[in-house]
Image (spheres, helix red, strand yellow):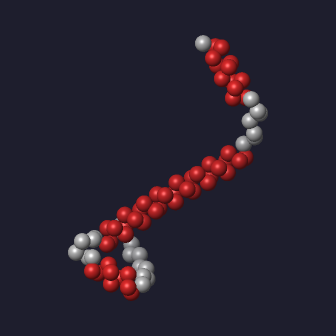
Amino acid sequence: MSVVLSIRIPKKLKEEMDKLKDLVDWPSEIRAFLEERVRRYKRIKVLREVDQILEQLPETPRGLADKLMREDRERY
């Protein structure tokens, strides 16, 4: 299912687009652009949510990573 999205653009831009209409399928170009933007902003949204979750986690004590790596190496 699809819907119609209507936008206003400057007249000069429309004239330039019309000059290129035999080279460019504008509806497909615009649709692809919007799809990419939606994907990008969805990723940004997820990253912000992850950042918020990470900010709520307690801080790791200094030197813990070194300690855990040493313990892990000693096991093998």
How many discs mark residues in the rendered view?
0
Using the rendered view, name the quadrant where residue 36 is placed: bottom left
Task: From the viewer's perspective, tell me whether residue 45 is left or right of residue 59.
Answer: left
For the N terminus, the quadrant is: bottom left
Vertical placement of residue 4 versus 11, above or below: above
Residue 66 location, x and y as percent? 70, 26
Q: Residue furthest bottom?
A: 11
Q: In what quadrant of the picture does the C terminus appear?
A: top right
Answer above or below: position of 61 versus 19.
Answer: above
- Does 12 appear above or below 45? below
**Would residue 20 be found to the left or right of residue 46 on screen?**
left
Give me the residue at 28% from left, 70% from top.
25
In the image, taking residue 26 as reference, residue 56 lies left or right, namely right
At which x and y percent is residue 6? 41, 79
Residue plotted at (52% across, 60% down)? 41
Q: Which of 6 and 16 is in front in this view?
A: 16
| Residue 20 rendering spot, x and y as whole percentages | 27, 76
In the rendered image of this protein, does residue 57 appear above or below residue 46?
above
Q: Position of residue 21 (x, y in %)?
A: 26, 76
Which residue is drawn at the image coordinates 35% and 82% (left, top)? 14
- Quick one: which residue is furthest to the left in this view? 22
The image quadrant that residue 62 belongs to is: top right
